[in-house]
Amino acid sequence: MSTESQSGGGVPETETMTMREAIRQALREEMNRDEDVFVMGEDVGLFGGVFDVTGDLVEDFGEERVRDTPISEAGFMGAAVGAAATGSRPVVEIMFSDFLGVCAEQVLNQMAKNRYMFGGKTEMPVTVRTTEGGGMGAASQHSGTLHTWFAHLPGIMAVAPGTPRAAKGLLKSAIRSNDPVFFFENKAVYEQEGEVPVDDDYTIPLGQASVEREGDDVTVVATQRMVGESLDLAEELAGETSLEVIDLQSMYPMDTDTLVESVEKTGRLVVADESPLSYGTHAEVVARIQEKAFFSLDAPIQRVGVADTHIPFSPVLEEEVLPHAGDVRAAIDRVI
């Protein structure tokens, strides 16, 4: 099972905070730790970020290290690539993951391939924070879930935390990494609260899943918002069906060992991820379990996600398209 890094050993001191506060704390700690770390993006400074994640960081670190940029994703993503290649550690905020297509050249052909093209002689310590997911009535151009696309690119790591604790630990590891890391934040859970270690040295290794609740009957591998929904469902079903809920945390690298260990115990698997069902994160988890734990399965693997469609603007239609705990419950019923 997974473990987490902490200084001094033992159980770390924690505080209750929201996902938003955990991300901001990680940024503040890493900016205090390393003067090469700086934040850049649209409205991250004086406005505090469109979702108030960067908050008052500009007051603590100034406009040189919390940089408001023009509305030009291609421009400031390219600037981040150059900064990372020459010794800085930029943390770039893209308001909505749907806008990442605007800077595809900078990501696909520059950021992802830089170390390879230069034979390992350069480093690319850039972190890209972006929001994704529906539930806010923001229509299809502001509600996509694109983490599978970036997890698919060689040279890039992709993480998507489901708890405030994971958000802090993974973001700190991302900023310290010498390779590009895309950090996907589901905007519907910024107010979700949890216990978060306050140790400045607390990190979660990239490529590590977390068993959030142990169980015996069904493994539920979830991401982002679906982690909380699955944990609530596990509590509701306690005494009837024992669910083991795993926060995948990292899309790439993926913690196959933790997933296999769980399925070998339960014999049943449901994958819940708020992204389109075809060719996605669900498929990668399913493929790895089929390869490594096929003979442990007692029922066909089930997927819970978004139908292969855009997110509607209508709240009623949006609610119909997005996955919820009820969909996880139906999938569990199919495997029991």
Image: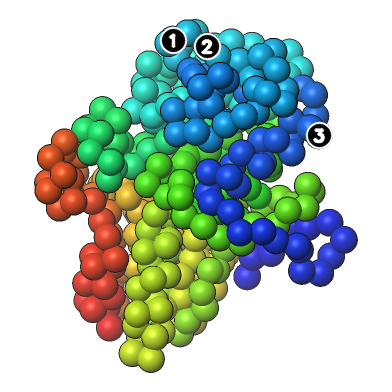
Residue denoted by label 3: 33
Q: Residue furthest right?
A: 8
Q: Secondary structure at mark 1?
A: loop
Horizontal side, residue 247 vs residue 313: left or right:
right
Q: Quadrant of residue 282?
A: bottom left
Pointers 2 and 1 in contact (CB under 8 A)?
A: yes
Query: In the picture provided, is 139 more to the left or to the right than 124?
Result: left
Q: Can you say whether 302 is above or below 156 in the image? A: below
Q: Earlier in the sequence, mark 3 or mark 2?
A: 3
Q: Residues within 10 Å of mark 2 (few under 14, many from 20)?
A: some
Front residue of 134 and 306: 134
Report if the CB atoms under discs 3 and 1 are less than 8 Å apart: no
Instruction: Name which residue lies at 43% across and 55% down.
Output: 223
As helix, strand or loop, the secondary structure at mark 2 comes to loop
**C-alpha gap between disc 3 and disc 2:** 24 Å
Which residue is labeled 1 in the image? 72
Residue at screen point 58% across, 10% down = 79
Amino acid bearing label 3: Arg
* Image location (x, y in percent) of residue 49: 50, 27
Mark 1 belongs to which amino acid? Ser
